[in-house]
Amino acid sequence: MKPGITPTSVERSLGDQDFIVSKTDAKGRIVYANRIFIDLSGYREAELLGVQHNIIRHPDMPRSVFKLLWDHIAAGQEFIGYVKNMARDGSFYWVLATVTPDRDTRREICGYTSVRRKPRAEAIAAAAGLYREMLAAEGRVGARDAIAAGTAVLEQALNGRRYEQFILAL
Ligand SMILES: Cc1cc2nc3c(=O)[nH]c(=O)nc-3n(C[C@H](O)[C@H](O)[C@H](O)COP(=O)(O)O)c2cc1C
């Protein structure tokens, strides 16, 4: 999240056929963003290249979701999840994201790629409700325990199901 941006209630949405694509280096710094990413974010390409994706982080997103994302991809696994992003003008847009590791010829992780599309309205509503609860749980405890508290809310919602299965059923 860029300091100084006030989140607004203006929602933007991508078209049914749109894919937002970006690639990062192994540290998560953006090395590529497609035209839709650039246009929707409201930043210029030069402002996006070299920085972390938290430039479009929305304050409504629980920290524990990003922890889960990084745990998956750093371990070489694909991550799927709903993400609320914030554009430069404070407006927001929801995406269903997949994030996957890229590997070099020695099979070492050399970067990450994310492809995002427009979620169904019901899935956005479900994810928004869950994230509200996760964020509230994170806020009730100190920063040190926030991730554990948010993750506990998610685990309760999973109710024994696998995370991917749960997400795709939202
Ligand atoms: C390929 C890739 C794509 C990502 N896409 C997003 C994104 O669209 N929105 C977002 O907030 N974080 C995204 N992240 C996660 C960010 O790197 C970061 O963990 C998150 O914004 C939380 O930032 P913070 O830990 O500084 O609060 C992405 C990470 C990777 C590797």
Image (spheres, rainbow, N blue to C red):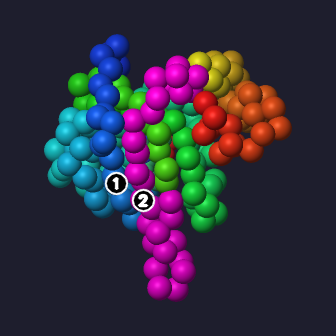
Q: Is mark 2 within 8 Å of ligand 1?
A: yes
Q: Write down the residue under mark 1.
A: 22
Q: Image point 51% across, 72% down: which residue?
A: 109
Q: Image point 30% across, 16% down: which residue?
A: 10
Pick the front one: 149 or 159 = 159
Q: Is mark 1 within 8 Å of ligand 1?
A: yes
Residue 159 in magenta? no
Q: Write down the residue under mark 2.
A: 113
Quadrant that contains the C terminus = top right
Q: In this view of the protein, can residue 17 be seen by the observer?
A: yes
The residue furthest front is 17
Estimate the x, y position of residue 156 in percent, counting from the top left. Answer: 79, 29
The kind of residue on which mark 2 rests is: Thr
Estimate the x, y position of residue 53 in percent, counting from the top left. Answer: 38, 46
| Quarter of the view holding residue 29 | bottom left
Above or below for 137 versus 119: above
Q: Image point 17% across, 52% down: which residue?
A: 46
Magenta region, residue range = 100-128
The residue furthest right is 160
In the image, is 35 to the left or to the right of 28?
left
Q: Secondary structure at mark 2?
A: strand
Check disc 2: other Cα within 10 Å, few if <14, some if 14-19, many if 20+. Answer: many
Ligand 1 visible in quadrant: top left
Estimate the x, y position of residue 153 in percent, counting from the top left. Answer: 73, 27
Estimate the x, y position of residue 28 in percent, counting from the top left. Answer: 43, 57
Q: How many marks?
A: 2
Q: Secondary structure at mark 1?
A: strand
